[in-house]
Amino acid sequence: MNIILLGPPGAGKGTQARILADRFGLVHLSTGDMLRASQAAGTAVGLEVRDIMARGDLVTDDIVIRLIEEEFDKGASIAGAVFDGFPRTLGQADALGMMLERRGDRLDAVIEMRVDDEALIARVTGRFTCASCGEVYHERTRRPKVDGVCDKCGGTRFVRRDDDNERAMRHRLYTYYRDTAPLIGYYYAKGLLRSIDGLGEIEEVAARIAAALPKAEARP
Ligand code: AMP
């Protein structure tokens, strides 16, 4: 099963993608995570994209398409994948369609997560993650149970993304509406789009997503 999670920055795509990947045995493919890993590793791509990402602009289609192709070459398409933050342009959507087709595979659903803009800004500006396992927390709505200790892995170092500030976030939203929102119509026309309310508790949203997936694919 191949699923795209589509939605503005801060909609909770990463959190829900992890849940879906666990539940359905899918590979979680996040181009944002891959690009941040390239930066952390100091690769040429990482250096090239650092300022673009910090501003909240999109990196070129070529770069992200290559990252996804590399994952496919490792065999990611066999189990199926949940795409998080990819595709973000019509060019990327076309490229993904062709990559899947070449492998005799297809997309099963595109889940659009809807959240209003002010809620997104509030979410993203309080967000921080565990440096060891990537678990996501929030200053106001989801602090670790024991202050300073990750609930999931016990890690004690937390990080914030360079682009999780109000200025970059407003620009990321602008970029989303300009470049990515046209994918809503693109996938609607293909009969793949399912829109869900992305506001609410993590488990509530996960249940809405599960209910929106093609029925034959869901496992108990
Ligand atoms: P994300 O973690 O998905 O919010 O992505 C963080 C940043 O990485 C974005 O603001 C872009 O600068 C870049 N990025 C991630 N995925 C893509 C993509 N599919 N196309 C272009 N840029 C991307």
Image (cartoon, rainbow, N blue to C red):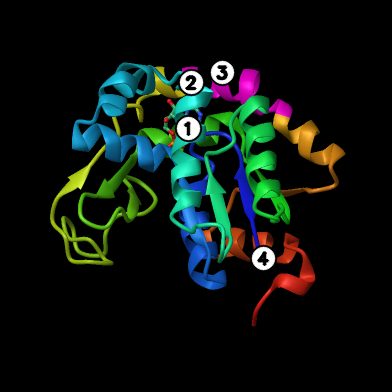
Side of 163 relative to 5 (left or right)? left
Q: Can you say which quadrant of the picture contains the C terminus?
A: bottom right
Q: Which residue is mark 4?
A: 210
Pair 4/2: label in front: 2
- Disc marking residue 60: 2
Marks 4 and 3, Cα distance to the nearest angstrom?
A: 29 Å
Q: Which residue is mark 3?
A: 174
- Disc marking residue 220: none
Can you tell me whether the CB of the residue at mark 1 lies under 8 Å from the nearest atom of ligand 1? yes
Pair 3/1: label in front: 1
Q: Amino acid at mark 1?
A: Val
In front here: 148 or 8?
A: 8
Task: Identify the element where label 3 is drawn.
Answer: helix
Start-end of magenta stretch: 171-182
Marks 2 and 1, Cα distance to the nearest angstrom?
A: 7 Å
Quadrant in the rendering for residue 95 = top right
Q: Which residue is mark 1?
A: 64
Identify the residue shown where x is 72% and y is 66%: 211
Number of numbered discs on residues: 4
Quadrant in the rendering for residue 145 = bottom left
Q: Amino acid at mark 2?
A: Thr
In front here: 29 or 172?
A: 29
Q: Residues within 10 Å of mark 2 (few under 14, many from 20)?
A: few
Can you tell me whether the CB of the residue at mark 4 lies under 8 Å from the nearest atom of ligand 1? no
Q: Residues within 10 Å of mark 4 (few under 14, many from 20)?
A: some
Task: Identify the element where label 4 is drawn.
Answer: helix
Can you tell me whether the CB of the residue at mark 2 lies under 8 Å from the nearest atom of ligand 1? yes
Marks 2 and 3, Cα distance to the nearest angstrom?
A: 17 Å
- The reply to whether dot 4 and dot 2 touch (C-beta < 8 Å) is no
- The reply to whether dot 3 and dot 1 touch (C-beta < 8 Å) is no
